[in-house]
Image: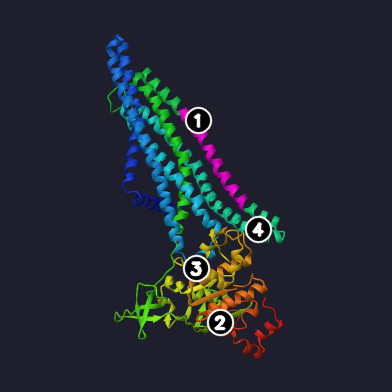
Amino acid sequence: MSQKRKQNRKGTILRLIRMLFQYYPKLLPCIMVLICINAVISAIPSIFQQKVIAIIQTAWEQGLAWERVQPDVVKNVTTLASLYGASLLANVLYNQLMAFFTQGTLAKLRDEMFSHMEKLPIRYFDTNKRGSIMSYYTNDVDSMRQMVSQSFPQLMISMITITTILCIMMYYSIWMGLVIILGSFVSIFITRTVGGKSARYFIAQQKYVAATEGVVEEMINGGKVIKVFNHEDEAETAFDEANDALYEAAYNANRYSNTLMPILNNVSYIIYVLVAVVGGLLIEYNVPNLSFSGLPISIAVVVPFLGMSRQFAGMIQQVSPQINSIVMGLAGTERIFAMLDEEPETDEGYVTLVNATEKNGVLEETDEKTGIWAWKHPHQADGTVTYEKLRGDVRFFDVDFAYNPDKTILHNITLYGKPGQKIAFVGATGAGKTTITNLINRFYDIEDGKIRYDGININKIKKSALRKSLGIVLQETVLFTGTVMENIRYGRLDATDEECIAAAKLAGAHSFIKNLPQGYQTMLDGDGSNLSQGQCQLLAIARAAVADPPVMIMDEATSSIDTRTEQIVQRGMDALMAGRTVFVIAHRLSTVKNSNVILVLDHGRVIERGTHEELLAMKGQYYQLYTGAFELE
């Protein structure tokens, strides 16, 4: 293992321990104390075994009657039984607390993960597969659960037991203790050699599980496309490649892991035999005992040593599988921490959106809902606060943007969206239309230039306030599991049923909703599979309508609606547009004819702008698109 990986692994362990103490600062020490009690008690029966054998041996050598030694034997046995009772109580209490601690830790961690994930920028989700992200909450959390609830405690028990047994061995006989220590070095060497290879493959297995889940999720989402284009064989090949990589890693991990246990088991038998032989030779030749107890080598020392050697070897065997489990758990934990370390979406904005009242042309902030929104703009220079009415005036000034530094997508974009105007973007796929709308709501930040919203630099507006003032209908409709009413209310959670119904009527969705089995209370699947694609899109438009924002972004909002329904929706959108700034992205040019301004984009540049009539008169690219002389794609 490289030095860097060792440092990373050490840092992960320390961070995990800090996190566990942070979650349960009092409970975790209690669990550790119970583990110590249980481990120490499990290691000391050999002491009482030695005492009882010594008592019986002395009685036999001196010809004492059983009645003479019975009280001492009973006393030792009773003490041992009491300790076992305490161990049982500690074990039961430990398991109960451990169950609460483990599940509580996972619940808190999942909450922290999800909360952090909600703060990540859109770029993170654009560059990571959803299946891989889901794997954080399934495989990685589960491997961490096994490590925290089983592997760490068992490793701690094993190490404490080994240390206690080793101290007892040295107390009774250093000679025989050295035999076991030498045998232990052999076991440790084998564990590091074979177990190290196993650990590397377990780490790879964790990575390939996430990759395989990513492929599965992608194939499930694209199931219809796979069927339509008869790509079942290609999809199966892609899955087989990911699955084969997972198989190789899992096979090798378990091959080395399963080989290790039989080897260690046989090494323990050899150590047992060596202890018996060495003990017998020490007794036979009356070798002076080297110990801290001062006891001579005898059956009373050798017999307990045999038991301790088996227990000692058993504990070392227990360490090996726990290490493999810990390696897998740490691999999952490293992935989780890597996600938690992802930089959240930055927001340096300080201009907020507040309810306001207007008296004599002066805006004042209020806690009541007045229907008037205003930008609250604190000025850091002089400490004053000004209020600017939310109008929906959006302007771009010489904006450049690149998803990657080496490839600029937008070049010198300048546009003006005044309240009540409808601005349309037209152009081939990849021209930069959707990218412009992503900049308006600050899913991404610009490289150069300025964007002003109601005269305020958009970077000064808090993102939550900015997005509250925007409504968006995407080409890819997203619905959530719940009723139709709940999906519409998603646009504004405090909207009444009447407002939701009014929004549905405005969007042209009311008529089909009434014909659903339970009307507005009809339950929808998460992907809206029990509705047509056009109906899903109508609900998305209604959801944007109930939000009642001053700026609307319609990204191919009518692409899945038939011509007749489009006319209904268009009337609703026209009503919705009154007093609002609307940005429309459309390939169907009939939907943008009544736009105030049409911008024609090509490779991230605005090449034409004007009204429908003006652009036709120019007889440029828009004219060719409209007359069919040039196809958008």
Label 2: few (<14), some (14–19) or many (≥20) C-alpha neighbours in 10 Å: many
Q: Earlier in the sequence, mark 4 or mark 1?
A: 4
Judging depth in this view, the residue of 291 and 631 nearest the camera is: 631
Between tags 3 and 4, which lies in front? 3
Query: Which type of secondary structure does the marked residue at label 2 adopt?
Result: strand
The residue that mark 1 highlights is: 266
Q: Which residue is mark 2?
A: 423
Q: In screen coordinates, is 92 left or right of 630?
A: left
Q: Label 1 amino acid?
A: Asn
The reply to whether the C-beta atoms of the residues labelled 2 and 3 are less than 8 Å apart is: no
Dot 3 alpha-carbon crowd within 10 angstroms: few under 14, some 14 to 19, many 20 or more:
few
Q: Give the distance between the C-alpha atoms of the residues marked 3 and 1, in whole angstroms.
A: 77 Å
Q: In front: 376, or 358?
A: 358
> Of circles 2 and 1, which is in front?
2
Which residues lie in the magenta part? Answer: 242-270
Quarter of image, res 316:
top left
Mark with earlier residue (3, 4) = 4
Residues at discs 2 and 1 in contact (Cβ within 8 Å): no
Measured in 3D between alpha carbons, the distance from the residue under mark 2 to the one under mark 1, in whole angstroms, is: 79 Å
Amino acid tagged 3: Glu
Residue 430 seen in render = no
- Whole-number angstrom distance, CA of label 4 to CA of label 1: 52 Å
Q: Secondary structure at mark 4?
A: helix
Name the spot of residue 420 as percent of width and height, x first. 51, 83
